[in-house]
Amino acid sequence: MQANVGGMDKIARIVVGLALLAMTVVGPKTMWGLIGVVPLATGLLNFCPAYTLLGINRCKTKA
């Protein structure tokens, strides 16, 4: 599992994930907010399976 998420993409995923999870506690209180686990996990793990399938790599690696 090689890192393929980096920089602003990582920060955006974490913020969006936390915002969606917060919706399960505050706001409409629906279970749809649990979908925030996906962007939060991909942001924290620096790995996105969809990026791998599409051949995208946004992580700066040292050559």
Image: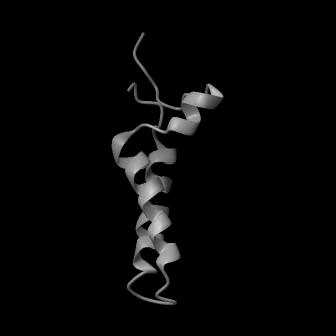
Q: Residue furthest top?
A: 63
Q: Is residue 18 above or below residue 49?
A: below
Q: Residue furthest right?
A: 54
Closer to the camera in the image, 54 or 5? 54
Closer to the camera in the image, 13 or 28? 28
Closer to the camera in the image, 44 or 28? 28
Give percent across and percent down for residue 29: 46, 88
Give percent across and percent down for residue 22: 40, 77
Q: Is residue 14 visible?
A: no
Q: Residue at x 60, y 29 (%)?
A: 53
Q: Residue at x 42, y 88 (%)?
A: 26
Q: Is residue 7 visible?
A: yes
* Position of the C terminus by quadrant: top left
Q: Residue furthest left?
A: 44
Count of labels shown? 0
Q: How is the image coloured?
A: one colour
